[in-house]
Image (cartoon, rainbow, N blue to C red):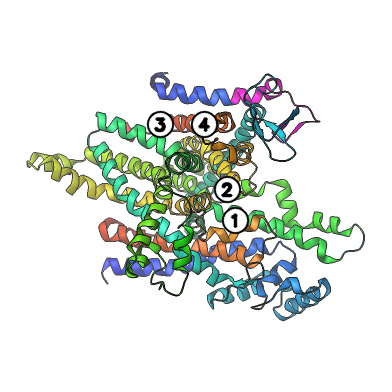
Amino acid sequence: MKRGSKFLRHWQNWLGMGLVACFLFLALAAPWLAPSDPKTSGDGFRLVPGLKGGLPFPPRPDAPLGTVATGVGGRQLDVFYTLVWGSRSAIRFGLAAACFTALIGVLAGAVSAFAGGWLKGLLMRTTDAFLAFPIIAGVIFFMQLLNLTKAYIPNQGVPGSGSGAALAANPLVILFDWIDPVLLALILFSWMPYARLTYAQVLNIRQAEFVQAAQALGASPARIIFRHLIPNSIAPAIVLAASQVGGMVLLQATLTFIGIPAGSEWGEMLAIGRRWIIGPLDNPLGYWWVFTPITAALVLFGVGWNLLGDGLNDWLNPRLR
Amino acid sequence: MPPLLRFLIYRLVSLPITLFIITFILYGFVMLTPVEVRASLYFPEGLNTDRLSDAELHRFTNSIIQKYRLDEPFPVQYAAWAGNLLRGNWGWSPVLGEEVLPALLRRTPVSAELALYSLLTFAPLGLWSGVRAGARKGSRTDYNFRFAAFVGVTIPTFILALVLMSIFYVALHWFPPERLGYESLHYIRSEAFHSYTGLVTIDALLNGQPRIALEALQHLVLPVITLCLGYWGLLGRVTRAAVIEEQHKEYITAARARGLSERALVWKHLFRNALTPALTSSMLSTAALFTSVFVVEIIFSFRGVSSLVVASFTYTPDAPTLLGFAVYSAVIVLLLMLILDLLMAWLDPRVREQVITL
């Protein structure tokens, strides 16, 4: 395990692994760390029972990291609860986005490098087309298309409860029931780097002897791609995926913060507490608990995955050493 | 034919193909929506849906479906829509009360100004610091650069924006948000102010109003810093990696053996050859830059192109704006990528030759 020890020699890699492990722990232990109660909590938020007021409350026994005032009926949201449960949804979202993205990219790259010809041409053109499409436009496009569909269908004048049935039968509604529009947009518009990486890798080993041997034995193209080409060229894609988990979650939080309902609890909490980020005149940091814990969580989440990805990259890519 | 010209022709031919693929996929998704949504793409100019009763709107929509054959298969509908796009007829948005294409173009200079100043800041800085760090790998400079670049790349845009705003606007009152103060905004919209380029900083100077130009610059400082930090880190890192890779090549050793000064070595040889990977990575992140510009625009209330679509999250969206925005984004990014591509081919003969084999 000489190569493994090289990876463990850098403190940055330890820090990266430690941070990622922390968030994994938070996510797994969420039900014990911050027990939920169906009456006051749901979707990553918890109203502190019996606490009312126009201003955020500092840390207290029933809300260890303080509260954020919602501005609706003086209700108060628990910061700690969102911090813990938000990490669960962040990890789920980040991993799902990175894995699906890598999957599509690796498949597209491997198939086009193996097949060559018109299929390669088409796939590479498609890669170029997707590269020219900004993620924000994709996210807005999918979300609003769904909203439009929902807005128009009840107007069709279907008698009785027919509109519900019409809505359920719409292909777009079915699609977005199955996959979140934001997740779909992120996946659809970020697989291109994986395709390029895998394409270059597969092209290198396509003429290798073990591939030729498999071909001579009569292995099907699918078997060659999945058993020989992909396992031997997937390492860089995994590295890229690791460093992208953080980026995906940051993007989701950013979109949520600017008002696009992208479903990041951390982003939403910061958006709700936006008015309190700047404290009273005599004390600009007067409501520090409204934004510090969540911001720290977001930044550390990004740092952790980034360090992990960079470390893996240095370790597996000898050219940068 | 000179290789550069051949390269240009090849790129110009592949541009419409790429656009075709993008619009094809976009309309493919639109096909999944109810036919009324697609009918709204053909609303005539000046239509006000609020004045129509439900029954009238229904009848009107049906007449559009008949007229534009929206009950026919995908290729027919796509061709009709794409033809309209090419003719510059991007549809009428009852929500905006405006035609979509002019609405997009009118707001473009606001976003362009932000992007332009950011580009002029982070591109030279990123290249410079990347080359310096890479040329002295392992030194103190290199270590500091790597740390700063890591911070720049990792801090989320909106958090950086909030921190900068609370320090420099709330606490110090140095740099206010929005594009201009109320008075100046009123003035540049008045008859007295002639708009040449749409970029306030330049127009104000051309109008002999240096005070407004200064004010616009003051408003640009925070958004530009917010945008630049991440892209500076990204570009610097790529340049650094490229410089390190070039450093061990034989031509560098040869140049050093000939007694070339270290300075000339770095800037004449290392820098020139590291430029191609740096430009390639910039090209790949053009679309991401577009996204960042919009995020920054929204946080600093700049009312650029993004205001067309993001405001629509508070009310019912409309299909022409939505599709118009998507196509517009793709066109802008493609044009930027074309410029970068040509720049690359002009700087590096290897890039020009490559094309022919594709």
The amino acid type of the residue labelled 2 equals Ile
Closer to the eye: label 4 or 1: 4
Of the pair B208 and A11, the residue shown nearer to us: B208
Relative placement, left or right, of A87 versus A18 is: right
**Chain of the residue under label 3:** A
Q: Are marks 1 and 2 in contact (CB under 8 Å)?
A: yes
Query: Which segment did they paint magenta?
Result: A24-46
- CA–CA distance between discs 1 and 2? 8 Å
Residue indicated by mark 4? A285
- CA–CA distance between discs 3 and 1? 42 Å
Residue indicated by mark 3? A316
> Do the dots labelled 1 and 2 sit on one chain?
no
Of the pair B253 and B69, the residue shown nearer to us: B69
- CA–CA distance between discs 4 and 3? 44 Å
- Assign the C terminus of chain A to one quadrant of the image: top left
Q: Are marks 3 and 1 in contact (CB under 8 Å)?
A: no
Q: Say few, some or many: other residues with alpha carbon within 10 Å of mark 1 (under 14 / 14 to 19 / 20 or more).
A: some
Above or below B66: residue A130? above
Image coords of residue A183 (percent x, y): 62, 45
Q: Say few, some or many: other residues with alpha carbon within 10 Å of mark 3 (under 14 / 14 to 19 / 20 or more).
A: some
